[in-house]
Every structure is written in structure tokens, then in C-alpha cells.
Amino acid sequence: DAMVIQNPRYQVTQFGKPVTLSCSQTLNHNVMYWYQQKSSQAPKLLFHYYDKDFNNEADTPDNFQSRRPNTSFCFLDIRSPGLGDAAMYLCATRAAQETQYFGPGTRLLVL
Amino acid sequence: SQQGEEDPQALSIQEGENATMNCSYKTSINNLQWYRQNSGRGLVHLILIRSNEREKHSGRLRVTLDTSKKSSSLLITASRAADTASYFCATDLENTGFQKLVFGTGTRLLVSP
């Protein structure tokens, strides 16, 4: 059974057109993460939520925002996607100091 | 900056051979986790090893951790073509005040039939 679900799996957007990626989890974990991964690179943490507390990485562009309306759901909003934002976006969840579980990812293409 | 460095960056072997990947890190950790990623897919968790553990096994996988050397290794025995993937180590940093995994640079493994 899927534990971390990401929709859609593939997303095509236009340059500058806002886009939202979604993530849901069935694990009831209090921490949720968003990573950006470009080809042949390691995942790069954008931000995470500890319950409702939002933690932004220092080098995450302002163009990236996130919302977590409840424990199960978390959204990544890209306000004005640029060509450089084309990447795989990975959502993950974990409980304290335990295994971190990833979703299958959403591949974003910016035209 | 990334916490972990992995070597080799790429590894090519034949089916049936063993594959060893190494991970080094810089600061004290709570645990270290290994992940596999098939091309274009999400990360699949393989093994978590805690800072007070030295070795863990899971099927054909063996992970070691040497906290004095700040290094870990992942051994895949009797490799199969299906093991072809990228492998990442990720460290759970101690005393960061919040939960954060930092990923290594990854090893791309190619297993040829």
C-alpha cells in the first residue's frame, strides 16, 4: 500500500505559470519534506514542516512556497516557474530519528 | 554543503559479483540511511543503521558503520541486473534541533547480465 503519494507523477507547465504539486501520507508522521532533484544529482532539501512549523532552507528561492493544511497533506507551490525549475520533486515523511519514506516524485517540465 | 561523499561515483560490474559503495561524512550523526533510486523514480529506503550499531544485514545487503572514521559502506552480494540504480547515503545529523537528512553525492551502479 502506498504510504507517500504524490500527484501528479508528471506535470507540464509554462514559463511563469504558477503550478502546485501535492503530497499525501498515510503514516501519520509529523514531519514532511520537499526535495528538488536534478538529473544525476542528490536530492536537495527545499523546506520541511514539523507539524505546522515551517522550516525553510536558507538557499531555497522565494519562488517556492509550501502549505500544510493538515497532517496528511502538503503542497509545493511554484509561483513563477523558470526553465531552471524543471526537475524531479520528491516529498518525504518521517517520525523522529526514524526511517524517512519518499513518494514516487513528480517530474516537472517547464516549457 | 553536502554532508556525505560517496565513492565510487560510478561502478560497473557483472551479474553475480559483489558491489561495495562507500560513504564518508563530516559531523556526528544519530543514524545513517541508505537509499536506492531507479532512473526517474523516487527513493526507496534500504537500511537504517544507528550510531551505536556497527553492522546490519537485509537480504543481500550488508551495511557497516564506523563512527570513528565517519564512514559507512553498503555491500550488495551476488548482484543482479535489477540492482542497477543509483545508491545514496543520507545522514541524520546529531543536535540539529530538527529532523533533517543530508544526502551524499550518490553512486551509480550498473550490473550487466
Image (spheres, coloured by chain):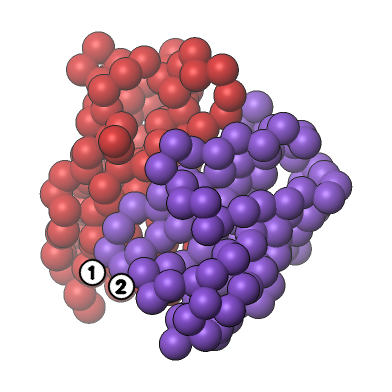
Chain colours: A purple, B red
Q: Is residue A82 left or right of residue A56?
A: left
Image-quadrant location for residue B72: top left
Image coordinates of residue A23 in percent, x first then y, are 70, 60
Residue found at x 30% / y 72%: B81
Q: Is residue A33 above or below residue A89?
A: above
The structure residue drawn at horizontal position 85% and vertical position 47%, both measured from the top left corner, is A70
- The chain to which mark 2 is attached is B
- Residue placed under numbered mark 2 in the picture: B81
Q: CA distance from mark 2 to mark 1?
A: 5 Å
Where on the picture, by quarter, is residue A79?
bottom right
Q: Chain of mark 1?
A: B
Assign a secondary structure to mark 1: strand
Q: Earlier in the sequence, mark 2 or mark 1?
A: 2
User: Residue A31's x, y, as percent?
Assistant: 68, 37
Circle 2 residues within 10 Å: few <14, some 14–19, many ≥20: some
**Residue B99 in picture, x, y percent from top left:** 57, 29
Q: Amino acid at mark 1?
A: Val
Assign a secondary structure to mark 2: helix
Q: Quadrant of the N terminus of chain A?
A: bottom right
Tell me the quarter of the image containing the C terminus of chain A.
Answer: bottom left
Whether tag 2 and tag 1 are in contact, CB under 8 A, the answer is yes
Q: Is residue A39 visible?
A: yes
Comparing A67 with B68, the one in front is A67
Name the residue nearer the viewer: A54 or B43.
A54
Q: Position of residue B57 (x, y in %)?
A: 43, 37
- Tell me: A18 left or right of A83: right
Disc 1 marks which residue? B111
